Image (cartoon, grey):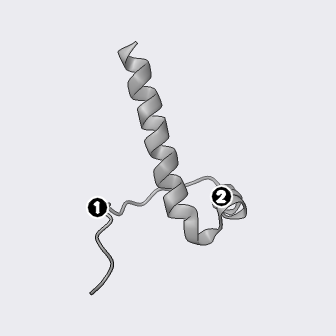
Amino acid sequence: MGRPPLNVKPILVRLPDGIPERIDTLVGKNKRAEFIRNAVERELERLEKATKE
């Protein structure tokens, strides 16, 4: 019995130098992907809300 699926699609994202290190400093390397997923989701919600106004 393994982990339940996360329902995610792997993609390659290129970040400017220093950004991964800044994320790791704040949340830890093992939480980097979760942080990026959450940040993208928040930004999408913000932009979607702005386009409805």
Closer to the chain start, of discs 2 and 1, is 1
Could you say which disc has been placed on residue 23 in the image? Answer: 2
Q: Amino acid at mark 1?
A: Asn
Q: Residue placed at 50% from the left, 60% from the top?
A: 34
The residue closer to the viewer here, 4 or 18, is 4
Relative depth, front residue between 8 and 4 = 4
Q: Position of residue 4 (x, y in %)?
A: 29, 73
From the image, tell me which residue sits under label 1: 7
Q: Position of residue 49 (x, y in %)?
A: 41, 23
Q: Is residue 41 left or right of residue 19?
A: left
Of 43 and 16, which appears nearest the observer? 43
Residue 32 location (% of width, % of height) = 56, 63
Residue for point 32% across, 60% down:
8
Residue 24 sits in which quadrant? bottom right
Question: In the image, is 7 to the left or to the right of 42?
Answer: left
Report crowding for label 2: few under 14, some 14 to 19, many 20 or more residues within 10 A (C-alpha): some
Give the number of marks: 2
- Which is more foreground, mark 2 or mark 1? 1
**Mark 2 touching mark 1, by CB under 8 A?**
no
Tell me if 22 is positioned left or right of 32 in this view.
right
Q: Is residue 47 above or below residue 5?
A: above
Q: Where in the figure is residue 52, as x and y percent of width and height?
A: 36, 16
Residue 38, compared with residue 27, is above or below; it is: above
Amino acid tagged 2: Ile
User: Residue visible at 48% across and 37% down?
Assistant: 43
CA separation in Å, label 2 and label 1: 23 Å
